[in-house]
Amino acid sequence: MSSLIEIDSHDSLTGLLNRAGFHECSRKIMISGESGLSVVWFNLDNFKMFNKRFGFDKGDELLKEIALILNVIFSPEKYACNLTARFSDDNFVILTNWSSVEMDIDTVQEYLYSLHENVTLRLRAGIYFPSNDEDIRTSCDRAKLACDNIKKNHSVSSCMFHDDMSRDIALQQHILDSLDNAINNGHISVLYQPIIRVSTGKICEAEALARWNDPELGIISPAKFIPTLEKYREIHKLDVFAMKRVCVDYRKRSESDMPLLPVSVNISRLDFELCDIISEIENSISLNNIPREMMKIEITESVNDEDMTVLTLGIEKFRAMGYEVWMDDFGSGYSSLNVLKDYNFDTIKFDMKFLHGFNVHKSEKAKYIISSNLEMARLMGMQALAEGVETEEQFEYLRSIGFDKAQGYYFGKPMELDEIFSLKRGIETL
Ligand code: C2E
Ligand code: MG
Ligand code: MG
């Protein structure tokens, strides 16, 4: 019987404690009144890729090496409270004394580097200091939140938990729980931002942007709800809803014989996996009598080799059917150039970072970067649109180098579709 308990509390691959064993031992230590405890959650960057590249056996070996390193650095001889555990996959958890925790994390990282000089392995660490009466599971969750928080920040290897992280989780949960209700009850709406043809200065298109006005929380920023919906693979619900709203707004104007504008809609690359986005759009535009050239498709790409085929096929299918496909936020991620190489777009939307703090007399480097990227777009036969134009000076510069289109607060913030048609600038006749 006692050996059964042994097996159940330990991880068979590494011999470290497992989740249940860790919880039990930690509780005992906390109840004993031991002070100055910290929980550390470790996760290895790109462990999936490591397994793919070197095979599962090597992956298992690596996990065992990490376990050994952790056992040496966090040995009970150093602090009696030290516990080492593997919860799952590449998730390791430690209970230790707080006094040297950051130094010890650095030492773990140095060991790992020295063992694998030819592969870059980063073991990210999230740190939480629990009080003795706190639930150990909550403490582990918080250490994990801190660890997840630096997933995209490669310049640091450890992070302490702070309260904002809990607030972020609560907001994410709210977003996920209330999405369907928000869609059905009008809490999500669509605004339109004008896009200007640089050569004429007139409005030639508009971009549809989703807005969420929550009855409990007020306005929720797209910077919060878009990444959450992508992370939890619910983004297609928003995208299909926004696209349908665009179609209805368009039809209303069209039925009243009012002037019309082509509209670009944002879709996530995940939409190609999560729903049949092409059929959704096709059905909706035909239901509302909208010609294909009146709807442009904006896609932001992020690095992910796995679904390249799905995206390539999706883009090609859209284009073959007569839709323009635009690459959104070019220059915002480090994969941008590869994305241009691998996919075919009709228009590149230059991210607003290019124009951030731009001054025509001082920003020499920015000018080189903008004009050479424009030249590249030209050579590849694509149109160039600059986002984030906020001043006349920026607009004049874009005109002087021959940008096709521009968008930004200088011309107008996102607004109701009808408002665009009363802007002084005027609409290009179709
Ligand atoms: P985006 O597609 O790059 O849209 C442009 C964003 O820049 C919008 O932010 C717009 O309000 C903002 N913007 C435009 N001009 C200026 C300017 O001159 N200065 C500054 N500082 N900002 C400007 P917003 O509406 O907050 O949207 C953020 C992002 O959320 C969008 O970036 C888009 O990627 C995403 N998004 C919005 N609606 C949808 C949607 O329905 N589906 C999907 N998948 N993504 C959406
Ligand atoms: Mg966009
Ligand atoms: Mg953009």
Image: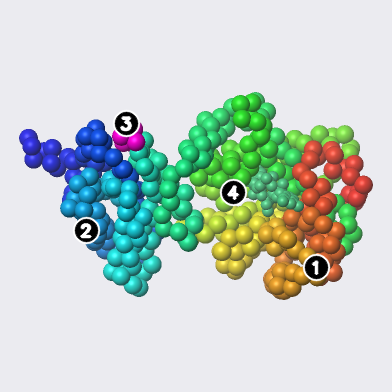
Tell me the residue that label 1 is attached to. 360
Q: Residue at x 24, y 53 (%)?
A: 74
Q: Nearer the viewer, mark 4 or mark 2?
A: 2
In the image, the residue with mark 3 has its CB under 8 Å from the nearest atom of ligand 1 = no
Q: Residue at x 36, y 42 (%)?
A: 129
In the image, the residue with mark 4 has its CB under 8 Å from the nearest atom of ligand 1 = yes
Q: CA distance from mark 3 to mark 1?
A: 60 Å
Q: Position of residue 332 (x, y in %)?
A: 62, 59
Q: Quadrant of the N terminus?
A: top left
Q: Nearer the viewer, mark 4 or mark 1?
A: 1
Tell me the residue that label 4 is attached to. 268
At numbered mark 4, what does the secondary structure look like: helix, strand or loop?
A: strand
The answer to whether mark 3 and mark 1 are in CB contact below 8 A is no
Counting other residues with Cα less than 10 Å from the Cα at mark 3, is it few (<14), some (14-19), or many (20 or more)? few
Mark positioned earlier in the residue sequence (4 or 1): 4
- Determine the main secondary structure of the stretch shown in magenta: loop
Callout 1 amino acid: Val
